[in-house]
Image: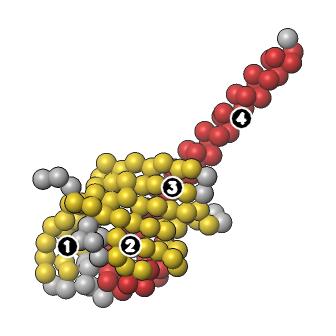
Amino acid sequence: MNKLLSLVLLMMLSIGSSYAVTSNNQSTVEQAVETMRLAMLSADKTQLENVALPSLTYGHSSAVIENKAEFVDAIVSGRSGFITLEFQDQSIVTEGDTAIVRHVFSADTNNSGQKGKVKIGVMLVFKKTGEDWKLLARQAYKLPQ
């Protein structure tokens, strides 16, 4: 009986610690996404460079694909600028050192002086490097009208 009780207790502790790691991962991924959103909104070059891995592939809903340098330059130069930027209906799934984030990307834009609005779906892939979550990939897609 004691062995059975010990086994059940060990299983419960394992499940509890696994939940704590997953919950902590989701929280830190959520913080990384918010850091990225604020860096995009403020066009902060240093922050934009810090949120992404060197191998970033950044896909737009227009089918344009940018690498890390192109992603950062487009925002910092004002070719892709934001007046407002919200990530709505966000979900985060973590699996080990990988996280998939989905949300609706809603913004008032100012692209090279041309004002507009955008509302698209986005999937982000983050990878944990050390203690930080960094953007590895992004793909945007058009939402049904």
Residue drawn at x 60%, y 39% is 19
- Percent of width and height locating residue 36: 41, 68
In the picture, the disc for residue 14 is 4
- Kind of residue indicated by mark 2: Tyr
- Kind of residue indicated by mark 1: Thr
- The residue closer to the viewer here, 113 or 119, is 119
Q: Which residue is mark 3?
A: 99
Distance CA(mark 2)–CA(mark 1)? 18 Å
- Kind of residue indicated by mark 3: Ala
Single out the mark in the foreground, 2 or 1. Answer: 2
The answer to whether marks 4 and 2 mark residues whose Cβ atoms lie closer than 8 Å is: no
User: Looking at the image, is mark 2 or mark 1 earlier in the sequence?
Assistant: 2
| Image side of residue 133 versus residue 138, left or right | right
Q: Which residue is mark 2?
A: 58
Q: Which residue is mark 1?
A: 109
| Image side of residue 114 versus residue 137, left or right | left
- Percent of width and height locating residue 74: 32, 83
The answer to whether marks 2 and 1 mark residues whose Cβ atoms lie closer than 8 Å is: no
Distance CA(mark 1)–CA(mark 4)? 47 Å
User: To which quarter of the image does residue 85 belong?
Assistant: bottom left
Disc 3 is placed on an element classified as strand
Distance CA(mark 3)–CA(mark 4)? 21 Å
